[in-house]
Amino acid sequence: MKRILSSLMAGLLIVFMFSTTVSAAQKSSMDIESLVDSTNSIIEQEIIKAQTQANDLTRKYISTIGQLENAQKVFSINNQANINNEQLVEEIKLKYDNNLDNIVNRLIQKTNDIANDAIRIAAENGYTVICEMVEVEVGNRFVLIDPLRVSDI
């Protein structure tokens, strides 16, 4: 729900910023450049937010694994303890991977939606805005995100 509201708010921000009535005429190239700049700024904020979430998640994961390894050293009584610890580590890793996937997928979806809104607004005004994929690191994953640039001004 929070993701939907955020996407909706970002989309509405873009629409309201650039839907002021300029006397029924098309937007100027400066308006479109401003649209692209503000959209890229919003996308950058989303990237930073996702990176922060992923860094926090990774820190917690590393801390938890470290605590398990320390506990294993202290309580290494028999092989059964090793088996249970390995299973627990695998479960924690799976949960970490799933949570990180969710962060990455939300980032991709949100930035795609934001970029598509800006592209649509520019196209409605006779301009072509394109995505230029850039690689960003989120957690231990590299993700392609789509900042914009105006191609025909």
Image (cartoon, rainbow, N blue to C red):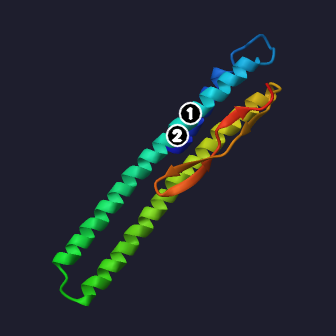
Question: Mark on residue 30?
Answer: none
Mark 1 residue type: Ile
Q: Disc 2 residue type? A: Glu
User: In the figure, 106 relative to 27: above or below?
Assistant: below
Write down the residue under mark 1. 42
SS label for mark 1: helix
Kindly indicate the quadrant of the structure image that contains residue 119: top right
Which residue is more in the foreground, 21 or 74? 74
Task: For residue 9, say whether it is visible.
Answer: no
Specify few, some or many for label 1: CA neighbours under 10 Å numbering under 14, 14-19, or 20 or more. some
Q: Horizontal and vertical percent for residue 27?
A: 76, 18
Q: Is 59 on the left or on the right of 15, as rendered?
A: left
Which residue is most to the bottom?
Answer: 79
Left or right? Give the position of 96 relative to 142: left
**Mark 2 Cα-neighbour bin, 10 Å: few <14, some 14–19, many ≥20:** some
Please state if 7 lies on the left or on the right of 133 as rendered.
left
Q: Residue at x 66, y 45 (%)?
A: 133
Dot 2 lies on which element? helix
Q: Measuring from the top left, give residue 128's x and y in whole percent.
A: 79, 32
Q: Which mark is residue 46?
A: 2
Position in image of residue 37 (x %, y %): 63, 27
Q: Are marks 2 and 1 in contact (CB under 8 Å)?
A: yes
25 to 138, vertically: above or below = above
Disc 2 to disc 1, how far (Cα)? 6 Å
The one nearer the camera, 100 or 9, is: 100
- Looking at the image, how many numbered discs can be counted on the residues? 2
Q: Residue furthest toward the top?
A: 23
Q: Where is the C terminus found, in terms of image quarters?
A: top right
Front one among 45 and 140: 140
User: Looking at the image, is 67 positioned above or below residue 12?
Assistant: below
Q: Nearer the viewer, residue 150 or 105?
A: 150
